Image (spheres, helix red, strand yellow):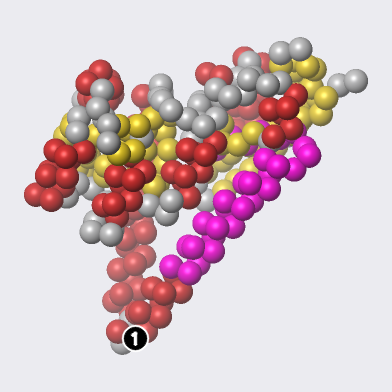
C-alpha cells in the first residue's frame, strides 16, 4: 500500500513546488491550504505523514501538529518553513512530536531523501515495538516498559535541549551542521563577533549560506570522515577553522571550531 502524505501550507505556490518535487514519487499525496480542511481529511482518513508550514493564519505548525499527536500517535510530523531562527528550530525538534525541521527554500533531492529516511526509520521503530508487544506476557509489564520509554525520551529530549543551550552560551566559537545539512546551532560569541552575519544561517542548507571554500571543506569531511582545517574570512574577521566529523544515529554531521586570527 502506498504511503500517504498530507501537505499543509497556506501558500499555493509552495504547494505547487512540493507537488512538482514529489510528482514522480510513489506516494499518495494531498495538498491543503488550511488547517481546517486538513483536520477534516485527517479525521476521515489519517495519513502516514504530515508536512506542515510553520507560520500559518490562526495557528503555527508546531501547535497544529502537537494538537494532533495525542489522537494520531503513529503519524510522522514534519515542519517546513521559511521562518527560521534558533528558537523555532529548538521548539520544533524538541517538542517531542516533530521528526524533522526543513527550511525553505529546500533542495528537492535532499527533501525526497529525508522523507524516504523518515518512513524507513518509522517502520523499523514500529517493528521493534511490535516485537516487544508480542514478547510481553502481562499488561502490567507492557505498562512499565512504556512508562520507562517515555521517561527515557523525556530525559534525552531535556538533555539535548540543555546541551544545545550550553553550547551556544559557552565562550567558544562553534557551528553545528545536522545530518540533513542544515546549520543547527551557532554559539553566541560568533553573533557578537559579527552582528547580523549569522542571523540567516540557522536552519538553512550550509551549501547555500556558507562561503564556497567552507562548504567544500564540510563536504570533504562528510565524505572522508576526517578532520579538515582552513583559514577563512567572514565579514571583516579572519578565523582559523577546524571541521570535525561526528556520527550520530540519524547520520553524519559536523561541528566547526573557530579561532580568531591575531
For this orientation, the residue located farthest to the top is 236
Residue 143: image quadrant is bottom left
Q: Which residues are magenta?
A: 150-178
Q: Residue 82, position in %: x, y? A: 41, 25
In which quadrant of the rendered view does residue 167 lie? top right
Residue at horizontal 14%, vertical 38%? 37
Q: Residue at x 44, y 69 (%)?
A: 149
Find the residue positioned furthest to the front: 58
> 37 above or below 22?
below
Q: Horizontal and vertical percent for residue 52?
A: 30, 36
Residue at the spot 35% in from the left edge and 73% down from the top edge: 132
Magenta-colored segment: predominant secondary structure: helix
Q: Is residue 110 above or below residue 160?
A: above
Task: From the top left corner, tell me how far across and down residue 12 is, in percent.
Answer: 22, 21
- Left-right relation of 197 to 43: right
Q: Is residue 142 left or right of residue 152?
A: left
Task: Inspect this view and state whether residue 110 appears.
Answer: no
Front-most of residues 211 and 186:
186
Task: Check residue 164 for magenta coloring.
Answer: yes
Task: Write down the residue under mark 1.
Answer: 140
Q: Quadrant of the C terminus?
A: top right
Q: Is residue 197 magenta?
A: no
The image quadrant that residue 79 belongs to is top left
Between 4 and 261, the one lying in front of the other is 261
Amino acid at each position: 500500500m502506498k504511503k500517504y502524505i498530507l501537505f499543509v501550507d497556506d501558500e499555493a505556490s509552495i504547494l505547487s513546488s512540493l507537488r512538482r518535487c514529489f510528482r514522480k514519487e510513489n506516494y499518495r499525496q494531498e495538498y491543503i491550504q488550511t488547517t481546517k480542511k486538513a483536520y477534516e481529511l485527517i479525521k476521515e482518513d489519517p495519513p502516514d505523514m504530515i508536512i506542515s508550514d510553520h507560520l500559518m493564519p490562526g495557528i503555527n505548525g508546531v501547535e497544529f501538529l502537537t494538537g494532533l499527536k495525542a489522537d494520531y500517535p503513529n503519524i510522522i510530523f514534519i515542519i517546513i518553513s521559511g521562518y527560521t531562527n534558533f528558537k523555532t528550530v529548538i521548539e520544533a525538534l524538541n517538542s517531542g512530536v516533530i521528526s524533522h525541521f526543513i527550511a525553505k527554500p529546500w533542495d528537492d533531492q535532499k527533501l525526497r531523501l529525508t522523507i524516504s529516511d523518515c518512513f524507513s526509520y518509522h517502520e523499523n521503530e514500529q517493528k521493534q515495538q511490535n516485537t516487544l508487544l508480542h514478547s510481553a506476557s502481562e499488561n502490567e509489564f507492557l505498562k512499565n516498559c512504556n512508562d520507562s520509554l517515555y521517561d527515557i525520551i523525556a530525559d534525552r529530549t531535556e538533555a539535548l535541549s540543555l546541551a544545545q543551550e550550553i553550547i551556544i552560551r559557552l565562550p567558544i566559537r562553534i557551528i553545528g551542521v545536522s545530518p540533513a545539512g542544515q546549520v543547527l546551532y551557532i554559539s553566541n560569541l560568533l553573533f557578537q563577533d559579527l552582528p547580523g552575519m549569522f542571523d540567516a544561517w540557522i536552519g538553512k542548507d550550509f551549501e547555500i549560506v556558507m562561503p564556497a571554500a567552507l562548504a567544500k571543506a564540510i563536504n570533504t569531511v562528510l565524505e572522508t570522515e576526517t578532520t579538515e582545517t582552513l583559514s577563512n574570512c567572514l565579514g571583516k574577521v579572519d578565523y582559523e577553522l577546524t571541521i570535525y566529523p561526528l556520527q550520530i544515529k540519524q547520520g553524519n554531521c559536523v561541528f566547526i571550531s573557530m579561532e580568531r586570527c591575531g
